[in-house]
Amino acid sequence: MEKKLISDRVKDRILKADSRALMKGAGFTDEELARPFIGIAGSWTNVFAGHVNLDKIAQAAMDGVRMAGGTPISFNTISTCDGIAMGTDGMKYSLPSREVIANSVESIANAHACDGLILIAACDKIIPGMLIGALRVNIPTIIVTGGPMIAGNYMGKRIEVINLTEAVGTVLAGKLDAAVLSEYEDEACPGCGSCQGMFTANSMSCMTEVLGMGIEGNGTVPAVHAKRFRMAKQAGMQILKLVEADVKPSDILNKASFENAVTVDMMLGCSTNTALHLPAIARAAGVKLDIDDFDRISKKVPHIAKLSPAGKHLLQDLDVAGGIPAVLKAGIDAGLVDGSAKTITMKTVAENVKDKKILDADVIRIDNPYSKEGGLMVLKGNLAPLGSVIKSAGVKPEMWEHTGPARVFDSEQEAREALEAGKINKGDVIVVRYEGPKGGPGMQEMLAITAKIVGMGLDTEVALITDGRFSGASRGGAIGHVSPEAALGGPIALIEEGDKIEINLNKRSLNLLVDDATMKARKDKW
């Protein structure tokens, strides 16, 4: 008996003759209409490097679909670049755009009766947004990402985009000539691809591989490699096998696969934004994943790779060292990763990586980890009773314990202007509040200010806490996601200028050194 397709509902020769006519008007033949419809959800734009190559990746995926006997149905979602929007009001649109993207994928997949989906994305919100949309529809899905950018070269030294971002602070501090900044600008981004380090885009791309939803190499193969086109074609062919076998995202994504993702997140010291996106994807999959899971896993998983911004290695180095497959194999051998988790190959994680090896022990240090605990930490205390997140992998030893006076600002812009005007002193704890999901609104990232702190040479002496969030490129004593947020009356709303704040990563604590009676009085007046 011939397999019943979802797309049959829009191409019945009698009842849907009008639909068939509309598709024939677009050039489709009877033969194409008889095949499975595979939605190709693209997100190409010509305005930023991370997505400028995605039209070619999407075309390769369409070629693969046709080779395997399917009909590609192409459409696009919006795509925003946090690097462009950073430090402006445009950043308030970034995180909400994830939901717009999810809605777009869900809408087209349902309205045009797709039998399967290939998601083509690269940057921060687009990857989780597309996965959330696909999970709502729950049809066979594979994600193919655009790949990381390779390093630039300046005066014989490797540079990346974060060097440029931090150099702005160095110029403001009078330690670098503005002409050199301009030269950095020309060399930091040599071509297409997501930013070179383990920032949010590459973190989420790596997560797709660990979750079992992406083609091998998704996380690390550089954008400029021809292998990217082969991967897309492979996805186009594989999706037809998933449609035939009716393997849906709900058959792949479960608690074990999400815990594997958090485990690798901790092993690599990925972006703090994974603590937002992974739970959102899990929720769409009907799986409960929360900040306590991150905290629990972080305490037992070693940090085995120092990738930028925490260290010198880039995604291209991780790729040469064996990539995510080598990390997964090491995790399985160490009893940290559940190898029985399923994947889009219709094999388990363990089966996929059984022959993989670490090829550079300087990049992937499973036998000599940087720390016994993971590269992200959840901090709690009277200032963050529901938790906060810090990329501990990017914090220098001097800042693991820090107590200093609060410098309170009710917006990122106010804090940034004070920093640029030289009004922040060594030892200060910058507090940026009313920038949470509700208070912002939009929970904007704050790379502009954290990069300036580093560029000014203050990252070992100044901390920043916020109910907003940070870029994956942020490093130093930057604590985000402080919860409850100020707009909900959380303790961060009650901090006053000069209050002492105590940060202790060794104890995973974040406390305001103000007595309870004073805090109650402040809350009554709030």
Image (cartoon, helix red, strand yellow):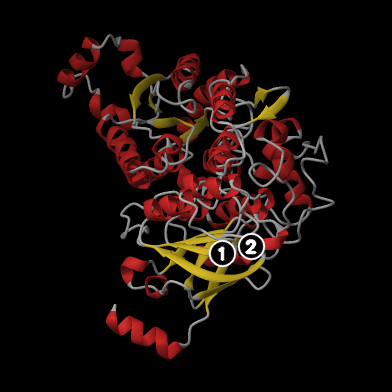
**Which image quadrant: the N terminus?**
top left
Which of the pair 76/16 is nearer the observer?
Answer: 76
Q: Quadrant of residue 491?
A: bottom left
Residue 36 percent coordinates (x, y): 38, 24
Which of the pair 24/17 is nearer the observer?
Answer: 24
Give the residue drawn at x 63%, y 26%.
150
Q: Is residue 505 above or below residue 261?
A: below
Residue located beneath label 1 in the image: 293
Q: Label 1: state its secondary structure.
A: helix
Residue 315 percent coordinates (x, y): 65, 34
Which of the pair 47/130 is nearer the observer?
Answer: 47
Which amino acid, by three-letter code, is at mark 2? Ile
The alpha-carbon separation of the residues under discs 2 and 1 comes to 6 Å
* Residue 289 can be seen, yes or no: no
Q: In this view, does 183 lie to the left or right of 81?
A: right
- Tag on residue 297? 2
Q: Label 2: state its secondary structure.
A: helix
Which of the pair 254/300 is nearer the observer?
Answer: 300
Q: Is residue 399 above or below residue 173?
A: below
Badge 2 vs badge 1, beta-carbon distance below 8 Å = yes
Which amino acid, by three-letter code, is at mark 1? Asp
Q: In which quarter of the image is residue 352?
A: top right
Q: Is residue 513 left or right of residue 106?
A: right
Q: How crowded is mark 1: few (under 14 residues within 10 Å), some or many (20 or more)?
A: some
Residue 458 percent coordinates (x, y): 61, 53
Q: In this view, does 112 lie to the left or right of 400?
A: left
